[in-house]
Image (cartoon, rainbow, N blue to C red):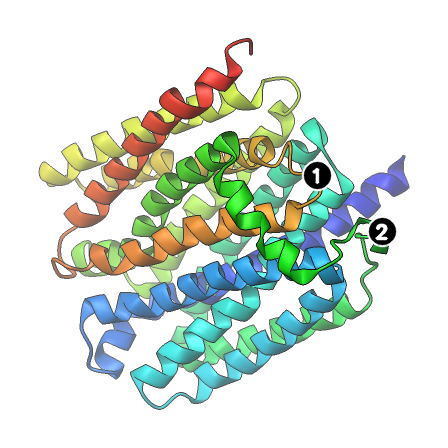
Amino acid sequence: MERIKIKQLRLALFLALLTALAPLANDMYLPALPMLHSHFSISTSLVQLTLTMTTVGIAFGQIVAGPISDYMGRRSPLLLGMIFFCLASLGCVYAENIWLFLLCRFLLGLSGASGIVIAMAIARDIYEGAELTRFVAILIMLNGLAPIISPIIGGQILYFGTWRDVFVLLFFIGIMLAISTFFFTETLPAQKRIKHIYSAFRKYPELLHDRYFFSHCLLQCFIFGAFFSYIAGSAFLFQNIYGVSPQTYSLIFGGIGLGLMLMGSLAARLAGRVSDIKLLKYATHISFLGSILLLILFLADGSIFIIYPVLFVTIVPLSVIGASSFSMALAKQDHNAGSASAFLGFSQLLLGGAIMPLVGIAGDDTPLPMTIIMITGYSLAIWCYYRRIAPEHRSD
């Protein structure tokens, strides 16, 4: 029993690193966003477009990697993705203008996306039901370490070096994961793989016609739209408006990451004891109420010591929302878990990437666009819950 737990933990750590890799490409250099503003002499919206390019790259990478992993297995596409991630990281290091940098940022997300979608598909290969919810919650909990550690590391790199050194570190992380993937045991046997690659892509229209799956897809789009507005706006909120240093900002951002990790741990403990639908309901409502309070505090010129706890409560329920909604969405997707996982990731990241530049549309000295987007996202998620998801769980 003890050996099984150790093996499960090792698998969880490996998959958590894979799912965190592409987000690391954003989180680790968040403290450097104001520096890019001056380095390339560009607008705030264009700076935030560097986040969008990686996010959109992740979205399209997942939509391709998911079906390919259902056709070829998990290991080979994952290894190829890690190799291209390393090359894209080097491209960011040596980019001499913003346009080349934007291209490399897109390729960074495109290649790193294989880690996200294939890791989730591996989890679905091995677990199901409450065990899948519990394992995904563990992944989210471990992923909570990424936004805790990566901005802190990024802040320290900026203290001793430049923003380019962030991508040097990403290169070496990619090398480490490529080596680990090389020795990874395949989890999708040949008899369970789809026979033709085009049939994998034909799964996407089928998913769109699955009302229950598509309802969860919509809800996650709205939730992650709110979350990505926070990602895009937080550096300017705390550094430009409240005047904190990049190092202090990395601690602030990391604190919310710790909250996400702890909430993921709570979700793992509650899985099987509290139904997924109830976890989804309570977490979504908490985030919505927090975003409303956040707007009131911003309008009243609240201090950072009041704003931060409310922002914390608004963001951290995302761990519970993600784990419960993901488990319910994939409950009936036995034979196309890779495609279903990819479509979920694609839709939420595409919307999140499109929203990011809107956060800076009014400049870098106001938090209102970020807050309004958050309220809108949580409001639409609650609408989706009551109109499309809850009616399917009347007996729960």
Please state, as top left, top right, bottom left or bottom right, where the C terminus lies in the image.
Answer: top right
In this rendering, is residue 171 above or below 55?
Answer: below
Quarter holding residue 74:
bottom right
Q: Nearer the viewer, residue 138 or 278?
A: 278
Mark 2 residue crowding within 10 angstroms, few (<14) / some (14–19) / many (20+): few
Quarter holding residue 57:
bottom left
> How many numbered dots are placed on residues in this image?
2
In x, y percent, where is residue 203?
59, 48
Question: Which labelled disc corresponds to residue 334?
Answer: 1
Q: Can residue 38 be seen at all in this image of the molecule?
A: yes
In x, y percent, where is residue 308?
30, 41
Specify the farthest residue to the top: 395
Q: Earlier in the sequence, mark 1 or mark 2?
A: 2
Element marked by disc 1: loop
Please state, as top left, top right, bottom left or bottom right, where the N terminus lies in the image.
Answer: top right
Q: Can residue 143 be seen at all in this image of the molecule?
A: no
In the rendered view, does 276 fall on the left or right side of 298?
right
Kindly report the distance in space between the C-alpha atoms of the residues bearing marks 1 and 2: 14 Å
In the rendered view, does 46 fall on the left or right side of 255?
left
Mark 1 residue crowding within 10 angstroms, few (<14) / some (14–19) / many (20+): few
Q: Amino acid at mark 2?
A: Gln
Q: Amino acid at mark 1?
A: Asp
In the rendered view, does 247 fall on the left or right side of 295?
right
In this rendering, is residue 114 above or below 352?
Answer: below
Which residue lies under the disc numbered 2? 191
Element marked by disc 2: helix
In x, y percent, where is residue 50?
34, 70
In x, y percent, where is residue 17?
63, 58
Q: Nearer the viewer, residue 387 or 33?
A: 387
Question: Which labelled disc corresponds to residue 92?
Answer: none
In the rendered view, does 359 fall on the left or right side of 51?
left
Quarter holding residue 236:
bottom left
